[in-house]
Image (spheres, rainbow, N blue to C red):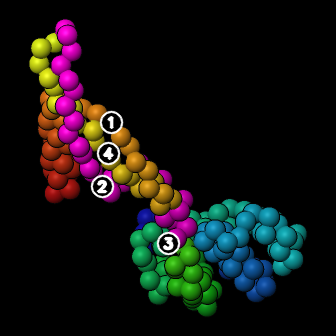
Amino acid sequence: MTDVTAALLPALKPLAALADAAFDALVALSAGVAAGTKGPADLAAAPALRGLAGLPPVHEALVAVYLDCARLGTAGDDLAKALAPALPAGRAKAVAALLDEGRRALVAALEDGGFGPPEVVDVAWQRSTVVASRQRADARSLYVVTLTTRQPGGELTPLKFSATTEQLSSLVAELKQAVRQVEVLCE
């Protein structure tokens, strides 16, 4: 069980007391919201959920559980076991079944709505020589560097900049140091 799922178990306990139609509607709508195919208006418009108080925290907890399980690749059976302390076995299995059925859509929603910095997917550079000016007798080499990044939503974006040989050497040294620091932290 993930820490997120464990922390959300108390918020999911009201699912055990819902009527079957309300349970089915809430779980299906929450899975749809997590996958990006449903919206908050769908929750408000569901006939089986009209007049029920206290649903938003349960709905939010379900969405969080679905997204966390999709992010970690949690199997439906493992989710059902994790939900056992809060829900009857049949309801835990129903929640888990929707995870398995909607896994692709959930993972796609995570990728589309991802957070964090863009990922560098390609680096290209070209050397160009700047002609010496009257004030300077030496010609200098410049490099035009293009970093292609992938945004969390999948969009590729080129980032261009120019650098002298010294600046490029400094950048490479800083990147090597950063890699070493990450390796130390991951050990």
Which badge, 3 or 1, comes first in the chain's sequence?
3
Instruction: Give the labeled residue for mark 4.
Output: 146
Residue 169 belongs to the span the image colors magenta: no
Identify which residue, 103 or 6, lies in the foreground: 103
Question: Which residues, given as a range, are shown in magenta?
Answer: 108-135
> Comparing marks 3 and 1, which lies closer to the viewer?
1
Compute the Cα span from label 2 to label 4: 8 Å
Q: Residue at x 20, y 23 (%)?
A: 131
Q: Residue at x 17, y 40 (%)?
A: 172
| Helix, strand or loop for disc 2 | strand
Residue type at the position of mark 4: Thr
Residue type at the position of mark 1: Phe
Instruction: Give the labeled residue for mark 2.
Output: 122
Image quarter for residue 166? top left
Instruction: Give the labeled residue for mark 3.
Output: 107
Q: Which image quadrant: the N terminus? A: bottom left
